Image (cartoon, rainbow, N blue to C red):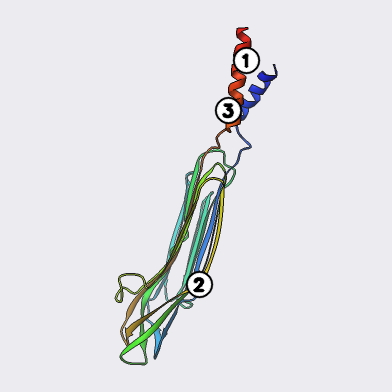
């Protein structure tokens, strides 16, 4: 009789695991706190029409989808997006030569399959500048102070979580490859935790011609995603259930 009661309890637990957790959480951010363009002589002049743009996107398997893109010349802008399981933000400013992005995924205590992604960027600066007040080739120092953070957690039925923060600065007429570049992809599996912070100034030196426009493209971009599934019964519970079934069957035959 006790085994029959236990069998009923186990069956109910396995079929309706309402208290089991299935968590997958990601938060990340990356900021360009003030791009510096420093010529050895003369000064820097941004040309009119230098654009700041921001893009944010969030989506999840519950049917949520949100997206926003904004852009402005010679000013500042921002964008945001959010769903039940994800959020993303981006911003950029031409006067400050700054850009920032953040995003995250949060799948808490959902006792079913769920997947979500967040793209908090890019936050971009795109436009032309030139070195004025001097002549001939000029040595120019580029400096990009960056601050970033990444936090990933999976518990319960969390299958995996990913995070990536990315920055690049490109002068297409100087090089086809970014002059400044940073990329840090992270991934964790079930029942894992990982935290990372980043603070550094990327630098590069280039030689430019005075009174010559140069196109500059700088962007920061974090991406995050996570997946969880319905938590599976433990091996102990399945074994106990099987033994109870065998016990009941043997008693009935006796």
* Quarter location, residue 237: top right
Q: Residue 232 in the image: state x and y as whole percent.
A: 55, 35
Q: How many marks?
A: 3
Label 2 vs label 1: CA separation? Answer: 67 Å
Q: Residue 176 in the image: state x and y as whole percent.
A: 30, 70
SS at badge 3: helix
Label 3 vs label 1: CA separation? Answer: 16 Å
Q: Earlier in the sequence, mark 2 or mark 1?
A: 2
Q: Earlier in the sequence, mark 3 or mark 1?
A: 3
Disc 1 target residue: 248
Disc 3 target residue: 238
Nearest the eye: 170 or 129: 170
Residue extending farthest to the right is 2
Eyeballing the image, is 207 above or below 28? below
Eyeballing the image, is 107 above or below 210? above
Nearest the eye: 146 or 70: 146
Q: Is residue 170 left or right of residue 149?
A: left
Q: Residue 84 in the image: state x and y as whole percent.
A: 54, 49
SS at badge 2: strand
Q: Is residue 38 left or right of residue 188?
A: left
Q: Residue 218 in the image: state x and y as whole percent.
A: 40, 71
Disc 2 target residue: 200
């Amino acid at each position: 009789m006790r085994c029959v009661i236990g069998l009923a309890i186990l069956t109910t637990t396995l079929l309706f695991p309402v208290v089991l957790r299935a968590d997958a959480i990601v938060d990340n951010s990356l900021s360009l706190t003030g791009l510096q363009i420093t010529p050895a002589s003369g000064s820097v002049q941004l040309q009119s029409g230098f654009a700041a743009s921001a893009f944010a996107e969030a989506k999840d398997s519950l049917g949520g989808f949100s997206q926003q893109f904004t852009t402005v010349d010679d000013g500042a802008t921002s964008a945001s997006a959010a769903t039940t399981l994800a959020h993303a933000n981006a911003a950029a400013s031409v006067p400050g030569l700054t850009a920032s992005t953040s995003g995250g995924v949060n799948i808490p205590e959902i006792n079913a399959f769920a997947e979500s992604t967040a793209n908090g960027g890019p936050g971009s600066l795109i436009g032309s500048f030139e070195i004025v007040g001097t002549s001939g080739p000029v040595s120019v120092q580029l400096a990009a102070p960056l601050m970033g953070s990444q936090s990933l957690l999976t518990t319960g039925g969390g299958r995996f979580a990913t995070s990536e923060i990315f920055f690049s600065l490109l002068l297409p007429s100087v090089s086809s490859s970014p002059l400044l570049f940073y990329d840090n992809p992270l991934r964790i599996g079930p029942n894992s935790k990982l935290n990372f912070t980043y603070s550094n100034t990327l630098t590069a030196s280039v030689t430019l011609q005075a009174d010559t426009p140069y196109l500059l493209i700088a962007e920061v971009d974090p991406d995050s995603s996570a997946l969880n599934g319905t938590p599976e019964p433990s091996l102990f519970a399945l074994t106990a259930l099987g033994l109870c079934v065998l016990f009941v069957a043997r008693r009935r035959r006796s």
